[in-house]
Image (cartoon, coloured by chain):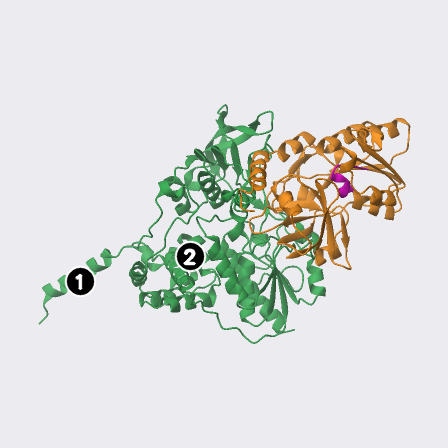
Chain colours: A green, B orange
Amino acid sequence: MKNIGVDVMETKETKEKKEKVPRQKMPEQDPKKRVHNFEEVPFGYSEETAIIEAKRCIQCKKPACIEGCPVDVKIPEFIKQIAEGNFIESAKVLKETNSLPAVCGRVCPQEDQCEKTCILGKKGEPVAIGRLERFSADYERKSGKISVPAIAKSNGKKVAIAGAGPSGLTIAGDLAKLGYDVTIFEALHKSGGVLVYGIPEFRLPKAIVEAEVEGLRSLGVKIETNYVIGRTKTIDELFEEGFQAVFIGVGAGAPVFMNIPGENLIGIYSANEYLTRSNLMKAYRFPEYDTPIVRGKRVAVIGGGNVAMDSVRTALRLGAERAMIIYRRTEVEMPARKEEVHHAQEEGVEFLMLTAPVEYIGNKDGWVTGMKCLKMELGEPDASGRRSPKPIKGSEYVIDVDTVVVAVGTVANPIVPATTKGLEVNKWGYIVAKDETGLTSREGIYAGGDIVTGAATVILAMGAGRKAANAIHEYLSKK
Amino acid sequence: MNKIVENKNLSENVVKMVFEAPVIAQKRKAGQFIVLKIDETGERIPLTIVDSDAQKGTLTIIYQIVGKTTAKLSQMKAGDSLQDVQGPLGNPTEIENFGRVVCVGGGVGVGVVYPLIVALKKAGNEVISIIGSRTKDLLILEKEIGENSDRLIVTTDDGSYGVHGFVSAVLQEMIDKGEKIDHVFAIGPVPMMRVICDVTKPHGIKTVVSLNSIMVDATGMCGACRVSVGGKTKFTCVDGPEFDGHEVDFKLLSDRLKTYCESEREAYEKHRCGCDGN
């Protein structure tokens, strides 16, 4: 005889148990403390928390999360290993398809990718895939037991990669594993691209990037820094030297200014310069490091993307008393990740929405002292689907500033296209490359990342590197 | 790593350095520059390539000791290494047979104008060089420039050597005498370049200047080096370093060069008293 009562009770109990395990939070530095240092904001999961979170994953037979990942990380598989306490094993699974897991765990917009498609997200909160990825990669690095993926026998074929950013590092790892002789040519003195010059220490510690780059070296990848493709050597010269295929992953590069009066006053930076000084050159540690930076008291950052958030949070850490985001639409339209906006708000950043600068005012020595702004209102949706801002007549007012960071986007850097004959670019100067392969208008030359798509995310650039690796492998296997 | 072959004072505060950079030495053309970084904590500074030896794989630069980085550089010895050297950067000088060319160099800019003189002479120009310094002891490359010029005029501000006065006065005199001048290159301190442009502009003599803006990446990524030329914003690193001097906003250039004056003074003072551990 069935005891209905017990059955019901059991179901209730299981249900309660499930509800009792919410998405695990990552402990973070107190906002009041962290605005005075450049140390990483979140501390990461403990082993216990990681296991609790990993056990939330229901191990779907047809995992939707993987479909959301540009590099097809075997998500349920690595999470299962964490749930069982096999942390090193989980890192191995990750590294089969992702050469930069500690980076991706930190800077990927998971909410728009794997976590967006996680089945748990339909009713409640998705599994914290990014946090688990970060945990697993960090655990392996700290353990010192870093695994080197299997490398195929050398095939003696040489591939050159321009740019040691996310796409270049990914393709280098993939091709090295397949037995290619890979050399990366990096223009700056350090490898990592945007990971070292753009993303601040408090979001992505540089030691982590260095460790991931070291991982590539252990695969046999050679890296030549201070090597500007197009200047130090052209792509055609690389072919003459015996490289059989070239991948261009040089990033979007050139900063956009707004072309408004006074924009060249002292104290007005492009976000690229501001962040490069602080991150790559470590100007926040001046004079221990030799590169200076203006430590503004009233800093306005123009723009609403992740780069704007990185800039404004850097300004706070450099001692700004007033750090402002100036954005011409509203918070709803801001392209920055919610998490970044939230962190900035916690730290005391002011958000001046529906505001656009029209002119900068300077003193006799050429320093910026003020910013004339117009109030905006939202009109009809534009081509991007976002409601376009329209200036309100007579709404001009001046904000006192001593530092401005212009973070309104980037355009293609022309050095590589200008020095490579027959390389087709589109009307914005980005290199034309096939979606599925990265093949450009020239045989043997592939491209991917921001120099093809315009400014996007780390993981999309990595996805492009992955596709080009497969395409180059196919191309050179026939040669 | 780039090994230093020679690091020798040309005057009290101007130093000539020769170091290994074989790939750049093969490739570089007159007017181009490099970015160097001494060590891990160093800053990136742009310096014009004065000369190169493709056979030996070396580059020559000439720098003035003005702050911490150049002071540190001057203390390095043959056999030491520079951690990072990147280049060649910027557009090469547009060298052609202009006819009669006047090359004006002031202070450490004499070192920058030297490779242009060599290249212009090679291209068949009649080259008249006017070089100047504050005082005799600070004058550099007189012999080398003399050997590559059809005529050389030297000036000193204090009259201790050559013509007493500024390089611009010599050029003005030539123009006043009705001497035919087809093209002018002027490289030196901002006030000097500005005055030379003021002298040539009324006569419509094309005048090219080489700008020494502050740079970070020097590949067009940061915009630190932006200048205004003909009312348009240009990046010195990728659009220059040479521009039509009659179109350059020298006030903006000189303002922007002062951006880090205070920080630089602080770093230099700490360096000189040994408080920074270097």
- Chain letter for the residue marked with disc 1 in the picture: A
As measured in the structure, the alpha-carbon distance from the residue carrying label 1 to the one carrying label 2 is 35 Å
Query: Does the magenta run of residues contain B108?
Result: yes
Q: Residues within 10 Å of mark 1 (few under 14, many from 20)?
A: few
Mark 1: which secondary structure?
A: helix
- In the figure, residue A353 lies in which quadrant? top left
Disc ID at residue A28? none
In this picture, residue B232 sits left or right of residue A84: right
Q: Residue at x 72, y 58 (%)?
A: B22
Q: How many marks?
A: 2
Q: Residue at x 64, y 65 (%)?
A: A245
Q: Residues within 10 Å of mark 2 (few under 14, many from 20)?
A: many
Mark 2: which secondary structure?
A: helix
Disc ID at residue A105? 2
Q: Nearer the viewer, mark 1 or mark 2?
A: 2
Q: Nearer the viewer, residue A360 or B164?
A: B164
Q: Is residue B8 above or below residue A65?
A: above
Q: Is residue B170 above or below residue B100?
A: above
Q: Position of residue A75 (x, y in %)?
A: 39, 64
Residue B106 in view of the camera:
no
Reading the chain from its start, which is encountered first: label 1 or label 2?
Answer: 1
Disc ID at residue A11? 1
Q: Residue at x 53, y 70 (%)?
A: A177
Quadrant for the N terminus of chain A, please: bottom left
